[in-house]
Structure formats: C-alpha cells, structure tokens
Image (cartoon, rainbow, N blue to C red):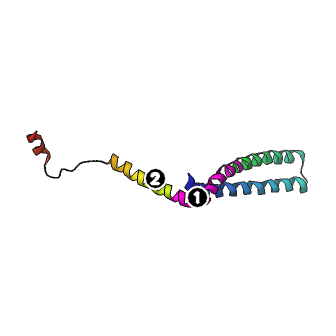
C-alpha cells in the first residue's frame, strides 16, 4: 500500500481538481446563461452530484496524504521494509515448493533397507 499510495494520491488529486473545474463551469452557467427554471434545476442536480464526487475524491486525498508524507520522510525505512518483505516471501515460497532429492539412496533401496 505504501508504494502504490503516491500514484493513488496523484490520481485522486487530479480527479478532485477536475470536479472543482466542473463546479466552476456549472456556477458560471448559472450566473451568466439565461436559463429557465427546468434548466436551472438540472444544473442544480448536476452541481450536487459533482460536489459529492469531489468530496469523495477529497477524502481519498486526505487519507493518502499521511501515507505519502510518511513515505517521503522515511524513504530508507520503506526500502528496507520492501526488501524484508521480498526476502520473507522468498522463504515462504521455498517452504511451499519444498521437496527432497535423495543424495545417495534411491527410493527402492530405502524401502529394502528399512
């Protein structure tokens, strides 16, 4: 999660900015265009939906901001933890794929001597 957080943060930030621009577009339409009641109502509904999306993206940005900041401040620690995780996964994989290859005795010889 720490490694991907910066990309997710940038993506959410860009989506938030896009929704902010849409908000400005709708507000300018309401202000400058000569609209009837039905058109204003549609724009108000659209504005509500845009603001809800923006709030959701803003929440994601705020949640990821702490992680991104931590990653920047602790680059060495994050790299060491990444290496540790890689080593741990390698050991776990070796336990799953474990098998024994006889060095001297073949399977039949083992059974006869027992």
Asked if residue 65 can be seen in this view, the reply is: yes
What residue sits right under mark 1 in the picture? 74
Say whether residue 12 is left or right of residue 33.
left
Find residue 79 and report its horizontal and vertical position in percent.
51, 59
Residue at screen point 12% across, 43% down: 110
Q: Residues within 10 Å of mark 2 (few under 14, many from 20)?
A: few
Say whether residue 103 is left or right of residue 69.
left
* Residue in front for this viewpoint, 23 or 67: 67
- The mark lying in front, picked from 1 and 2, is 1
Find residue 36 and report its horizontal and vertical position in percent.
90, 48
In the orientation shown, which residue stands out farthest toward the left?
Answer: 112
**What stretch of residues is rendered in magenta?**
58-79
Residue 73 painted magenta: yes
Mark found first going from the N terminus, 1 or 2: 1
> What's the mark number on residue 85?
2
Rounded to the nearest whole Å, what is the CA distance between mark 1 and mark 2?
16 Å
Total number of numbered labels?
2
Which quadrant would residue 78 be assigned to in this image? bottom right
Which quadrant would residue 28 be assigned to in this image? bottom right
- For the C terminus, give its image quadrant: top left
* Residue in front for this viewpoint, 37 or 110: 110
Q: Is residue 19 above or below residue 107?
A: below
Residue 67 painted magenta: yes
> What's the mark number on residue 1?
none
Q: Secondary structure at mark 1?
A: loop
Q: Residues within 10 Å of mark 1 (few under 14, many from 20)?
A: few
Asked if residue 7 can be seen in this view, the reply is: no
Residue at screen point 49% across, 58% down: 80
Magenta-colored segment: predominant secondary structure:
helix
Find residue 48 and report its horizontal and vertical position in percent.
79, 45
């Amino acid at each position: 999660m720490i490694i991907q957080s910066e990309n997710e943060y940038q993506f959410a930030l860009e989506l938030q900015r896009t929704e902010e621009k849409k908000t400005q577009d709708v507000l300018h339409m309401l202000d400058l265009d000569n609209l009837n009641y039905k058109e204003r109502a549609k724009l108000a509904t659209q504005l509500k939906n845009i603001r809800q999306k923006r709030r959701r993206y803003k929440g994601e940005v705020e949640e990821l901001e702490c992680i991104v900041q931590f990653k920047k401040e602790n680059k060495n620690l994050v790299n060491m933890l990444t290496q540790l995780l890689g080593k741990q996964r390698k050991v776990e994989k070796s336990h799953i794929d474990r098998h024994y290859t006889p060095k001297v005795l073949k399977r039949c010889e083992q059974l006869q001597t027992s």
